[in-house]
Every structure is written in C-alpha cells, then in structure tokens.
C-alpha cells in the first residue's frame, strides 16, 4: 500500500491528514503507517511461508513498531544488548530473537544466553571462544550460526556494504569449515548453521544469488565432513524506492533463495529491516523561512540531527508539500536545509519545489528507516516526536523531547557549584 497520498488536496498518511498531525503534535515529527508496515511483513511471510522472518531493529526500534510486528508473529534481529531488551519488552518471544553483530560484549552475550534467545550469529574465532566460555560457565548450551563473509560486492553504497572481504563483518568463507568444526567441539555451543548478510539497500538479485550459492556450497562441504547444518540465515538488505530505484519483488527474492538453498533441507531465516519500515514513514517539517539571494534556500525546522541520511550517505528523499500544488504550478529549484550550524545540513539539493513560505509544511518521504533511530540532539536540538497511524487515528509513540529533559541528562559536580538536583549520585 502507498502510505502517503494526496486526498482532496491534502497529503495523508492512511486516512489521517498530515496537517492535523502537525497542528496537534507540532513539527518536526516522524509519522509511520501501521498498515504499510504490516502489508510488507505479510508479503514476506507469504513469500517465505516456512521461514523465520525476524525484523531488524536497527532500521527503526520504536517500541510501538516492535509491538505491532511482534503481534503479527515477527521475530527480531538485534545487534546490541539494548535492542535485545527492546525486543523482549515489545513481546517478541525470546526463542524468535537472533543476536547479530561483530562486537558483542561478554555482558551482552551473558544476557542473551540467560534470556534464552533462539540464535547467536558468531562473527569471529575470538567471539566463538567468548561465547563458549560464557555458556559453559552458566551451564547452558546455545544455538550458534557462523556468519560468513562471502566476498560478494552488493553494488550498494560503500558505507552499507557488509559482505566484501575488506568489511569488518563475518569470517572469511574459506575459514568457515574449520571454525565450524572447532565450534562443534567447544562446550556450551550447538553449531546449527551459517548466516550471511552482504549489505543494505540492494536493488539487484545477482549479488544475493552469488551469496546464497556460496552458502549452499559451504553447507554441502561441511556436511561432507560429517557435521550437521540445520539452519541458514539469509540476512536482509532488500532495497526500497527512494527516487527511481527498481528493487526486486519479495517474491523474486524468495525464489532466488529457493533456487540456491531450497533443496538443502535447512530451516531458513531472514532479517528485513528497511524494506519493512522505510517507505512507511515520513518526516513532517515546517518552513522557517525562504532565503533567496541568487540561490534559493528553503530553511525548515527539521535538520541533519533528525534525518542524517542525506548528509551521511548523500541519500535522496522525496519532499512533498502537504498542500497539493495546483496542476501546472510553477516550481523553482531550491536547497532544502535545516538550521544546524553545519554546511552539510542539507536535506535536498537543487530540488524543484512549488511556492513555499513561512509556516508551509512539507513531508520528507521514505524516512521510516534510519531516521529517528539515528537521530541526535546536536546543537542542543531536542529529539523529534514520533507518531503511529492506524486508519483514521494516530497516537504519539514517542513524545517530543523537551529542553528541560535534554538539560537534565547532564550532571554538574559539587566542585563546580552544581545545584543539588544536578549533582552526581552514587
């Protein structure tokens, strides 16, 4: 479903006018469509009927979105102890949680084992030893998948590529058989299979086919050594449309997996993130002023601290006024920028936009993934509010941070004359 569309001249999320949200909640505010999120999850569940679909929390970890997906039957892919606690708090069953990540601490590993999560994806020999020591010390046995690096170029942005040999993730695929055999002899571990994840925002199936084929060869080679391989974790990374991309369908993605590894008798799991929530969200902002002195700047109250993707990845996000322009209305190129004291605080460059003025509202689309979750309070800007829409109603699922709350994070020591309420407590 299309989460954002004009109805009677006004931009809506599902059946809620964005003007209503702006009036009641203020801006900047992230707006998410529950219907669009569920539609995408159901498409994955239908395309992979026998697989374990785990939502990758790093895309958007708002508790309401996690609860929405958990109630639909989604598992969770977590990459930190904090994300693990969020998944549990949202009601994701512990045995449907996969813990990935290249730098899990001993404390995080211990908590994951104690919580009884379904699988830990190990990414190095050192981590395998840490996991064995911790599990054995707790008298537990944990299911382990070895994440391999197949050295496949996903042909995506360099900063979101994870499956090339120069990336920090996984173990070299040539070393995987020996390390898998070693893990099979370590106390506290039950080696169950292999995992792979080659990058994010993939719009071509060819890299997937290469990675899945490598996973299939590895599985057959390890089984030939007499070892058991029960599970294959296919990772995530299916792209979405930001501008003019043409990502493959979920069904085509599933068919590619079936062709390469479907005949191995392994239980499959996958971890979509961006493709579930990316197009389901938008960042709603107000125009502060228009600066036109040869070059036109539309200055809005959202900034790189709210949505860092354009600054970090040179990413494109479509920007729409919430009042539908008249057919044939003139447009003029402008840079859409925030108020942060950085030249890089640009949301869009040379964008043809209709007439905008102080108080006009715009929606920055495709901001449901890696938007609020990567936000900061740089320039002492409070974090934006977040709203979840369902049909004709909406709810604030994260209130706007206040200046008082932002200030209250810090503590002034006694020797600087801090007031009692701001002094460090033991």
Image (cartoon, rainbow, N blue to C red):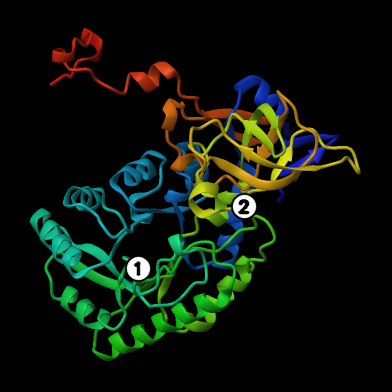
Is residue 377 visible to us here?
no
* In the foreground, 237 or 183: 237
The part of the image, by quadrant, that contains residue 128 is bottom left
The secondary element bearing badge 2 is classed as loop
Q: Is residue 98 above or below residue 378?
A: below
Q: Which residue is mark 2?
A: 316
Residue 361 spot, x, y in % from top left: 70, 30
C-alpha distance separating marks 2 and 1:
25 Å
Labelled disc at residue 388: none
Residue at 34% over, 84% down: 218
Q: Which numbered disc covers residue 167?
A: 1
Q: Is residue 129 visible?
A: yes
Q: Residues within 10 Å of mark 2 (few under 14, many from 20)?
A: some
Instruction: Give residue 404's quadrant in the image.
Output: top left
If you read the primary sequence from the N terminus, does the residue marked by circle 2 or circle 1 appear first?
Answer: 1
Q: Residue at x 12, y 71 (%)?
A: 186
Label 1 environment density (alpha carbons within 10 Å; few <14, some 14–19, many ≥20): some
Task: Give how far across and how far down residue 105 sits, in percent.
Answer: 20, 52
Question: Within the image, what quadrant is residue 192 found in?
Answer: bottom left
x and y percent of residue 103 in the render?
A: 25, 56
Furthest residue to the bottom?
224
Residue 314 at x, y percent in the picture: 55, 53
Residue depicted at 13% across the width and 56% down the height? 134
Q: Secondary structure at mark 1?
A: loop
In the orientation shown, which residue stands out farthest toward the right? Answer: 328
Q: Is residue 344 left or right of residue 57?
A: right
User: Closer to the camera, 169 or 234?
Assistant: 169
Q: 342 or 405: nearer the eye? A: 342
The residue at 70%/61% (across/down) is 244
Above-or-below relation of 64 to 52: above
């Amino acid at each position: 479903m299309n989460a954002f569309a004009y109805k009677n001249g006004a931009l809506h999320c599902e059946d809620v006018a964005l003007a209503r949200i702006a009036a009641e909640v203020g801006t900047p505010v992230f707006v998410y469509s529950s219907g669009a999120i569920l539609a995408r999850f159901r498409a994955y569940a239908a395309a992979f009927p026998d697989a374990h679909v785990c939502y990758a929390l790093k895309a958007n970890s708002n508790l309401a979105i996690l609860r929405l997906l958990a109630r639909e039957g989604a598992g969770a892919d977590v990459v930190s102890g904090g994300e693990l606690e969020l998944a549990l708090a949202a009601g994701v069953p512990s045995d449907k949680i996969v813990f990935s990540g290249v730098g899990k601490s001993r404390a995080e590993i211990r908590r994951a084992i104690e919580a009884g999560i379904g699988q830990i994806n190990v990414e190095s020999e050192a981590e395998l030893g840490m996991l064995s020591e911790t599990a054995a010390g707790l008298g537990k046995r944990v299911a382990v998948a070895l994440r391999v690096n197949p050295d496949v170029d996903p042909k995506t942005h360099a900063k979101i590529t994870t499956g090339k040999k120069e990336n920090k993730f996984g173990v070299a695929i040539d070393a995987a058989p020996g390390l898998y055999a070693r893990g099979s002899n370590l106390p506290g571990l039950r080696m169950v299979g292999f995992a792979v994840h080659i990058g994010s925002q993939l719009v071509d199936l060819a890299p997937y086919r290469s990675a899945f084929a490598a996973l299939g060869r590895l599985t057959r080679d390890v089984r030939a050594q007499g070892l058991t391989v029960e599970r294959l974790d296919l990772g995530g990374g299916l792209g979405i449309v930001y501008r003019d991309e043409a990502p493959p369908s979920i069904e085509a993605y599933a068919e590619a997996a079936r062709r390469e590894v479907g005949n191995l008798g392994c239980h499959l799991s996958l971890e979509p993130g961006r493709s579930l929530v990316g197009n389901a969200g938008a960042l709603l902002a107000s125009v502060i002023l228009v600066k036109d002195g040869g070059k036109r700047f539309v200055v809005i109250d959202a900034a790189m601290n709210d949505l860092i993707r354009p600054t970090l990845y040179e990413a494109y996000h479509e920007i729409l006024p919430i009042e539908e322009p008249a057919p044939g209305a003139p447009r003029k190129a402008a840079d859409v920028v925030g108020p942060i004291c950085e030249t890089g605080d640009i949301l869009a460059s040379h964008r043809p936009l209709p007439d905008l003025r102080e108080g006009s509202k715009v929606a920055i689309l495709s901001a449901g993934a890696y938007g609020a979750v990567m936000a900061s309070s740089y320039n002492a800007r409070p974090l934006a509010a977040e709203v979840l829409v369902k049909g004709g109603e909406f709810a604030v699922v994260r209130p706007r941070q206040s200046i008082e709350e932002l200030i209250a994070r810090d503590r002034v020591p006694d020797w600087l004359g801090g007031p009692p309420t701001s002094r460090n407590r033991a």
